[in-house]
Image (spheres, rainbow, N blue to C red):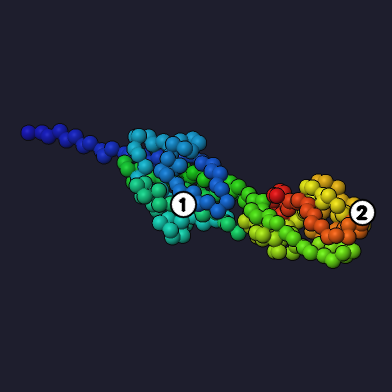
Amino acid sequence: MATFTITTNEKINNPPNQIGDLTLNVIHEQSYTFSLNDFTTNTIPQYSDPEGDIVEQLQILTLPNEGTLLYNSLAVNVNDIIDSANVNLLEYDPNDSNNNSYTTNFTFTLSDVGSSTFSSEIGTVIINKLEAENEPPTEVGDGSATIDYGETLVFTRDMFTTQTTPPYSDPEGDAALNLKILTLPQDGLIQLNGSNVIVNQIISFSDIDSGLLTYVPDQADTDGDIENFTFSIADAGSGQFVE
């Protein structure tokens, strides 16, 4: 009796044939947590596999040169492999010491559940870290001073900052840069280097530090008086005035 033998070869399952790039904008001092979609459907082009197999694992091929890539709060190393179910434990922490905007990237590849083989295709995650937003001062307080008759008051920086109620405060700790005079006293004159100050005039704190901003009282008023004026301050970081 003769026998006819038929051999069926194993089905060849191919690795993913298309892996795309992702571009992210991240905010200063805010980490970004990845999802599996960031490496599949959110990329250009999208993830594709010849047999339609879903992603099994993610492999990190290179690391960003700014900021830190973390997995489960630990620093990621080159060639680290992450199961698809745990991609949400992967996050990017920007370099918070760099207040400027920057662009960095890392590369990756993927394997599918059919072949368990990593693709030769490489994807890139491009990260644009946005410039830190510098906030204006949060506190600009009221000040006061008492002078004798005929005395000229020489303003100091502290009179508008540390000696006010509440004291001057800025979120980033930026120093006071400019003073803007919003209203003038009814009697007497505010002068900058001997010239009368006008409403909305901007005076640098460097001029105040030099003793150039003064109040000259009305010499005709011999009975004593209470005068006031209003002002706002801009910080060195944002340049925005706050009353």
Left or right for 47, reference 10: right
Residue 34 image offset from top left, x and y in percent: 45, 47
In terms of image quadrants, where is residue 15? top left
Residue located 49% across and 55% down the image? 69
Position of residue 219 relative to residue 46, above or below, is below
Is label 1 in contact with label 2 (beta carbons under 8 Å)? no
The secondary structure type at the circle numbered 2 is strand
- Look at label 1 and name its amino acid: Glu
Per the image, the residue denoted by label 1 is 91
Q: Nearer the viewer, residue 61 or 11?
A: 61
Mark nearer the viewer, 1 or 2: 2
In terms of image quadrants, where is residue 47? top left
Residue 152 image offset from top left, x and y in percent: 87, 63
Residue 175, visible in the rendered structure: no
Residue located 41% across and 43% down the image? 36
Per the image, the residue denoted by label 2 is 195
* Disc 1/disc 2 C-alpha distance (Å): 58 Å
- Counting other residues with Cα less than 10 Å from the Cα at mark 1, is it few (<14), some (14-19), or many (20 or more)? many
Residue located 32% across and 43% down the image? 113
